Image: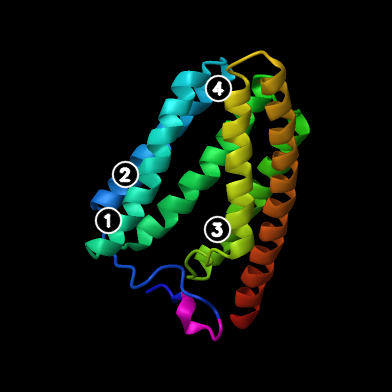
Amino acid sequence: MSRAMNDHVDTPQYSPEPRDVYLTVPNLISLLRIVSIPIVAELVSHHRMIPALAVLALSAISDGMDGLIARSFNQVSKIGQLLDPIADRLLILCSVLALGLAGIIPMWMLIIVAIRDLLMGVLVLILAQHDYGPLPVNFVGKTGTALLMVAIVALIVADVWDNPFAHMLHMAALAVGIWGVGVYWLAGFIYFRQGFALLRETE
């Protein structure tokens, strides 16, 4: 059995009482979110921003629904704890990739985000080898994700029009995105410290 994060003193739980269940409504919603991500990326990379915004809106609604349903109907699951952050990471990575391919953001932003997510993926795999579940989400991580998502949506909206307001929105969104990348990396550093602290306890 996986060692729960609450086995460690002063370590917050990732989610209350996760169960070993797979076929649940929240997990299905999370899978549909993941399936929608390549659609968003394809639309954005071809500058089809209105349909991309529509799919993103549905994805955002489903993101809130799966958590609400899981808590309300006692369907919190271990696999669901993994699917939800995976969906968030994939959405950010694929959206940034699409924006880079569309020439809307500089490619260095894509590279920095991709390296961070690659390192986090390696950390998750290493922790899994030592029978640990996902690390608890912290405030910095939520902030970085929120900043990047705001920047992504604003950049998509700005690309719909070609006028002075759209250009100003584009520049403001880029600024938010740069801050978001910085906070995203800071959160990654915190996660790595937490992960290595857990690994040292197993030695």
Mark 3 or mark 1, earlier in chain: 1
What is the span of residues highlighted in magenta in the rendered image? 5-10
Residue type at tag 3: Leu
Residue 7 on the magenta span: yes
Tag shown at residue 180 = none
In the image, is residue 11 above or below residue 91? below
Q: Residue at x 42, y 41 (%)?
A: 60
Q: Residue at x 67, y 41 (%)?
A: 114
Cβ–Cβ below 8 Å for labels 1 and 4?
no
Measure the alpha-carbon separation of dots 4 and 3.
30 Å
Residue type at tag 2: Ile
Q: How many residues crowd around disc 2 within 10 Å: few (fewer than 14), some, or many (20 or more)?
A: many
Cβ–Cβ below 8 Å for labels 4 and 3?
no
Measure the alpha-carbon separation of dots 1 and 4.
30 Å
Measure the alpha-carbon separation of dots 2 and 1.
10 Å
- Give the residue at mark 1: 69
Cβ–Cβ below 8 Å for labels 2 and 1?
yes
- Give the residue at mark 2: 29
Cβ–Cβ below 8 Å for labels 3 and 1?
no
- Give the residue at mark 3: 125
Give residue 187's position: percent from left, percent from top.
67, 59
In which quadrant of the rendered view does residue 71 lie? bottom left
Left/right placement of residue 74 relative to residue 146 reads left
